[in-house]
Amino acid sequence: MKITKRPLLPALLATALLGSVSAEAANKNNGAWIEKGDDFRGVAMPIDGDSLYIETDKGRVEVRLYGIGAPEYDTPFGPFATRLLHRLSFGKEVVCTDTGGRTHYRIVARCKTADISADLGGVMIQEGAATPYRSYLYRGDRDVRDLYFRLEGIACNNKRGLWQNRPDGICGD
């Protein structure tokens, strides 16, 4: 079994900024008041390239961005993905919509910030910091799936991030 390390600095910053909660309590109560389709808002603190804490008026929520997969922090492009999500969302108010999914006690949601008013997952894909999570997207909203696949093509054709070393003509596989 491979153990994946979470980046230490973001975790320490999150604890310092958002307060300390036991892992067990946070997992059991993570967004218990939020239901599928609900919008919730709060201040963002990225954990890695596809997860973030949202400090809401009812407490901290751990969110997994819907439909994307970003490299783990300790792999190539992992720090790039984490830095991009940090730049896009750290300390900003975000509005998220619960998609109804749960993974490792995290709420799966689509989120955006007011200043870019674009889906954070889509921006991560378009910048080459993440790829569409195909197995989930094929079960979900077709419009989102089509958008994410188009954005991946843009990133690939422009050799952004993960795609920078791909040979021409190999995009979209």
Image: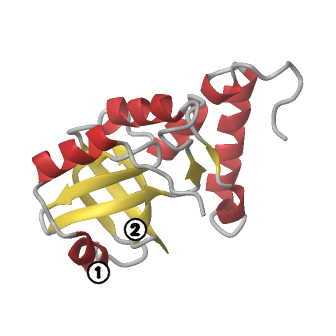
The image position of residue 35, as x and y in percent, is: 36, 78
Q: Give the secondary structure at mark 1.
A: helix
Q: Between 9 and 136, which is closer to the camera in this rendering?
A: 9
Image quadrant containing the C terminus: top right
The image position of residue 31, as x and y in percent, is: 28, 73
Residue that lies at the very extreme toward the right in this rendered image: 169
Q: Residue at x 47, y 40 (%)?
A: 73
Three-letter amino acid code of the residue under disc 1: Lys
Q: Quadrant of residue 40?
A: bottom left
Instruction: State whether residue 90 appears in this view.
Output: yes
Q: Between 69 and 67, which is closer to the camera in this rendering?
A: 69
Q: Is residue 87 left or right of residue 21?
A: right
Q: Give the secondary structure at mark 2.
A: strand
* Front label number (2 vs 1): 1
Which color scheme did the rendering employ for the protein?
secondary structure
Image quadrant containing the N terminus: bottom right
Q: Quadrant of residue 30?
A: bottom left
Q: Which mark is residue 107?
A: 2
Three-letter amino acid code of the residue under disc 2: Ile
Q: Between 93 and 6, which is closer to the camera in this rendering?
A: 6
Q: Which residue is mark 1?
A: 28
Q: Is residue 41 left or right of residue 173?
A: left
Q: Is residue 4 above or below residue 102?
A: above
Instruction: State whether residue 119 appears in this view.
Output: no
